[in-house]
Amino acid sequence: MSELQDDGAGGNGQDEAAAFASPAKRLRRSPAPEPTSVLYNRSPSPPTSSSLASSSAPEPPPISAEDWEVVLSGGDMAAPPAAARSQDTSFLRWIMDADAQVDAFDPFLPPPPCQETAAVEPFLHPQPQFQFPVAEEDLGPGAAVDELLEAARRADTGDSTGALEILARLNHRLPSPPGHPHPPLLRAAAHLRDALLRLFVTPAPGTLQPGSVSTPLDVVLKVAAHRALADASPTVQFASFTSTQALLDALGGARRVHVVDLDVGFGGRWAPLMQELALQWRRAPFSPLPLPLPCLKVTALVSPGSAHPLELRLTHEGLTRFAAELGISFEFNAVVFDPLDTFPPTGLSVAPGDAVAVHLPIGSGAPSPALPTTLRVVKQLRPAIVVCVDHGCHRGDLPLSHHALNVVRSSAAFLESLDAAGAPADAVARLEQYVLRPRVERLLLGDRMPPWQTMLASAGFALVQLSNAAEAQAECLVGRTPTPGFHVEKRQAALALRWRESELVTVSAWRC
């Protein structure tokens, strides 16, 4: 652990700064925190309402490597000394450095939070596509869901007129925009209403896909939303750590790893894997010949119009700088991939000797990975492991009303967990606009197909049992979450993070 920190601290010299300089004006950031292994020394737990009110409260102690070994062996873990504190190495926090200063305004660089002015405030709250006056008395959550399900049933039977009449009434009775102080179920119903309305709207040429952003300011706010999600909910760390452990178990000691990601986002999920590759390299037995540096290559398959160029630029530059701090080799490539196209994507290739892994998101706002074209491309890569992250509500095989009920229940549970964690209202508003709303629209407007597990199995993929280390790690993470109500459930070979009785995210591994 100490070796990794010493080496990482040495990577902030003038040579590194010169190597990654670009014509655009850069942020003057304070020295980056020493990189640490996320799996062995976690970032602090999500904030509670009390910690949000007082920033001086001490952070919970990290888990040392020795304590982690005790957890895996089934023993009792003693509390680490209070002096051992870890700096927050959250990857998205590292991109959005709060101490950064800008020499001059650059619309393509995210401004630090302290420079957000009142002019930006209107953009911090969800701006639904359909805005109508709100009646004096909003509809109750249960009655709203019943009417939405009736609209979905009519839409499924072809009665578009009846469905639109119900949705028109709901426009005046559901909150617009949804948000505090309305209860989670009512806010989830409002998002479902907006998604159902899009079923009857013919998109104009050039219309953005759900979740896509059109301006640099939207990109900045989208980064802030994902950062807020990582701070407020254990779902991000659960998915990232469990996926990383599954990859490490499948890839073994591979030093050249090629990850194909169908929903790269801002790349934060790959920071733990980069740290583990660097840690394994430094812990390798002594050899008279120097060992080659580990290499990670990330190929993002991006559907047309789904990502702003600035998003990919931030992902590329952020991961590249992070790899430089860790001292490992890194490559990033974005490839345009249309799941509806019958031809394989141009530019997607695997070098001999690379260990290939694939990340398939389910219901996260990315295009459906269960399309036959997608599975055919994945199978041609001959991956050692395919990791699926399911957000708990992808049931496009059901009638629309049943599918809508699953979506609204999952969305309400997600919002309820954020409220219980004491997430600030402005952070939740960003999350609803840039995370939850695109997810709901993708699920409702996506292709109607059999369950994705069935399609994977029929395409020749077999479920792989997750290791005991992955399960113990997930239990340890949830145990460090200060908000009661989260728990881990093992379902066959998969691991699920649940909020009370509702599933939030499930991670499973598959092999071709």
Image (spheres, grey):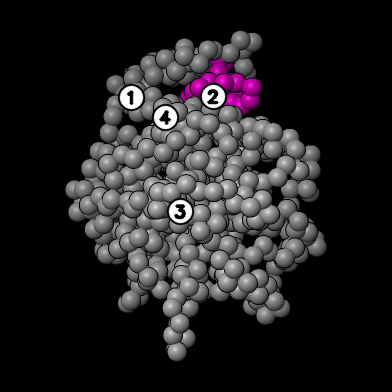
From the image, tell me which residue sits under label 3: 70
The residue at the point 50 percent across, 74 percent down is 282
CA gap between label 2 and label 1 equals 19 Å
Identity of the amino acid at label 1?
His
**N-terminal label among 3 and 1:** 3
Image quadrant assignment for residue 386: bottom left
Span colored in magenta? 171-197
Say above or below: 252 vs 136. Answer: below
Residue 166 relative to residue 315: left or right:
left
Residue 177 in magenta? yes
CA gap between label 4 and label 3 equals 30 Å
From the image, tell me which residue sits under label 1: 402
Q: Secondary structure at mark 1?
A: helix
CA gap between label 2 and label 3 equals 39 Å
Nearer mark to the viewer, of 2 and 3:
3
Q: Nearer the viewer, residue 25 or 379?
A: 379
Identity of the amino acid at label 4?
Ser
- In the rendered image, which quarter contains the N terminus? bottom right
Nearer mark to the viewer, of 4 and 1:
4
Identity of the amino acid at label 2?
Pro
**N-terminal label among 4 and 2:** 2
Residue 245 in magenta? no
**N-terminal label among 4 and 3:** 3
From the image, tell me which residue sits under label 4: 502
